[in-house]
Every structure is written in C-alpha cells, then in structure tokens.
Image (cartoon, rainbow, N blue to C red):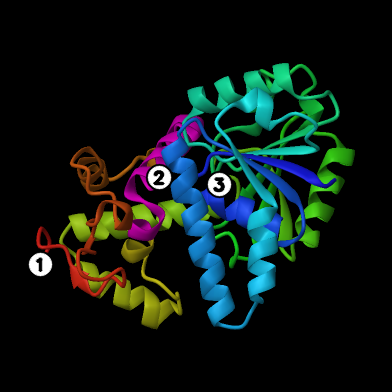
Amino acid sequence: MKNIAVIGAGTMGNGIAHTFAQFGYKVNLIDISEESLDKGMKTISGNLDRMVSKEKISAADKEATLNNITTFTDIPKGVKDIDLVVEAATENEDLKLKIFKQLDENCSAETILASNTSSISITKIASVVSNPERVIGMHFMNPVPIMKLVEIIRGYNTSDKVTKSIMELSENLKKVPVEANDYPGFVANRILMPMINEAIETFYNNVAGVKEIDTVMKLGMAHPMGPLQLADFIGLDVCHSILEVMYDGFKNPKYAPCPLLTNMVMAGKLGIKSGEGFYDYSESKKAEKVSSQFS
C-alpha cells in the first residue's frame, strides 16, 4: 500500500496528508477549493519548517515530504490507482455519504475506503458503498503529525483483512492504533465530549468561571489542557455536532449540547479558528485571556 488519497485539506486532512507523505507514501490531497488546498499546503510547509528548526527532520526530509503530495480539485482524477482513501471532510453526514457514493463509483473494488469521522456511524457510511467490507474508520487525533493515537473503527460489515491492514498501516506511521466498535462517538468522543459539555454546563450554571474550571482540571486531574480551552482548540462547532450525533444516536439527554454551547456556535464564536470562544485569541493563541463576554 503506497498510494494514498486524502479528501479535505482542512486541519485534519492536511495533517493526515503531511503524516503519510513524511513516511514516504505518495499522497493525493483532494479538495473542491483551490484556496483550501493552498492554505493546507502552506500549513504543512509551516509545520515541517518547525520540525526542521527543532532538528526533528532535515531540510531534505521537508523537501521530500512536500514532493510526495500532489493536489487535486476533482475526486475522480484524485482517486485513480489509489490503494487507500482517507476521507477527512467536514463532520456532516450528508456530505460524507455523498463523497462515499462518488468513491464507490470511481475507485477500484480493492481500494480501502476510510473515514476520519470522529462520531458518524461507519456502518451508515458503508451502506452507500457496493462492497461495504472495505469501509473502515480511521480517526486520527489533532494535531495529526504529533498525536500518537488512531482509533480504528470497524463498521458492521468491515472485514478482518481490511482491519488488519489498517492497523498495520497505522503502526508504519509510528501511531498506536486502537480498535473500537461502531457506536456513536466511538471511545474518544464518547468519554471526552460529555466531559467538555459538563464543563460548559458548570460554567453556564455559575458554579465557577472559565479560568477556574480549567485550572481545577489541569492542576487537580493532571489534564494538560482545561476542558474549555480544549473545546476552543477542537472548535465549538465540532464539539456541538459530535454531541448532536451522540444525542441522536443514544436518545439520552446526558449527550444534549448545553444551551450556552448552542448559542456560541450560532453566534459564530467557535474558538481558536474564529478568534474567540471561551478565550480571546486576538493577541495570542495560548488561551491567556478570557473572552470579554465572560470576564
């Protein structure tokens, strides 16, 4: 398995493309937007520069990594003669189903089709593919080049052969693959998102302030980042959509997004990506200043 296609040049997509390319795989990075592709390649180049400055890789390694990536704005051209497709588009079920229908039409029957979804059912995604045994979840963590974990999610029909192949591939990327079955939120987000939601509820109910909640979890529970800062880092819109998927899947009110989270997403306060969430990022990306809305 040497030829990889990654669909989506956003935060996760460019990180996945970077990681495969750094380990010598030929990568086709596909996005409908030329602007997104340019931005994604710029991010990859900047991240590689940081690695060079820290002497983790050489300038030649950086050049080789970038040369391993080719960009496309067209799925049929981008997935020609590909061994594995990793879909990393926006966390939207309809969009993912549409992409997988296209992949089914344009990929060879042997191509493994993986989704980087963080919560949407792999079984549901596989239902639009003619041979669903080749569909699997490959959920990388952000930032992809640094984080070791990959959640490998078996859909109802995913074959043992495909699972074994993707587990081995993840290890080739120096990642630690962990197998999970296909239920809403899988393992990572089934545990993480209710914690983030509860932290938002705790703030919403005036139990403590933003900084105070984060400090308790950092100093009391040894978390490297407080839950509200982490929510800003992930993106409040992403947290909201994952909670909605879990609420819809389990019909359990404990997964319902906090009303404050819903309001912040509607107001466009999405965290680091929008410049403001629970913290203000206009001057620094380090979550040092609580948003004026909450201070």
Above/below status of 105 relative to 178: above
Q: Is residue 216 visible?
A: yes
194 or 169: nearer the viewer: 169
| Residue 92 image offset from top left, x and y in percent | 46, 31
The alpha-carbon separation of the residues under discs 1 and 2 comes to 24 Å
Q: Which numbered tag is attached to residue 13?
A: 3
Q: State which mark lies toward you, 2 or 3.
A: 3
Counting from the top left corner in percent of width and height, residue 136 is at: 72, 37
> Which residue is painted at 53% across and 39% down in the image?
8
Magenta-drawn stretch contains 17: no
Is residue 198 placed above or below 225 in the rendered structure?
above
Badges 2 and 3: C-beta atoms under 8 Å apart?
no
Q: Which residue is mark 1?
A: 295
**Quadrant position of the C terminus in the picture:** bottom left
Q: Which residue is mark 2?
A: 238
Viewer can see residue 123: no
Residue 236 appears left or right of 289: right
1 or 73, which is in the foreground?
73
Type of residue at label 2? Val
Q: Foreground mark, 3 or 1?
A: 3
Q: What residue type is disc 3 on?
A: Gly
Q: Amino acid at mark 1?
A: Ser
Alpha-carbon neighbours of circle 1 within 10 Å: few (<14), some, or many (≥20)?
Answer: few
Gap in angstroms between the C-alphas marked 2 and 3:
15 Å
Does the stretch in magenta take in 245? yes
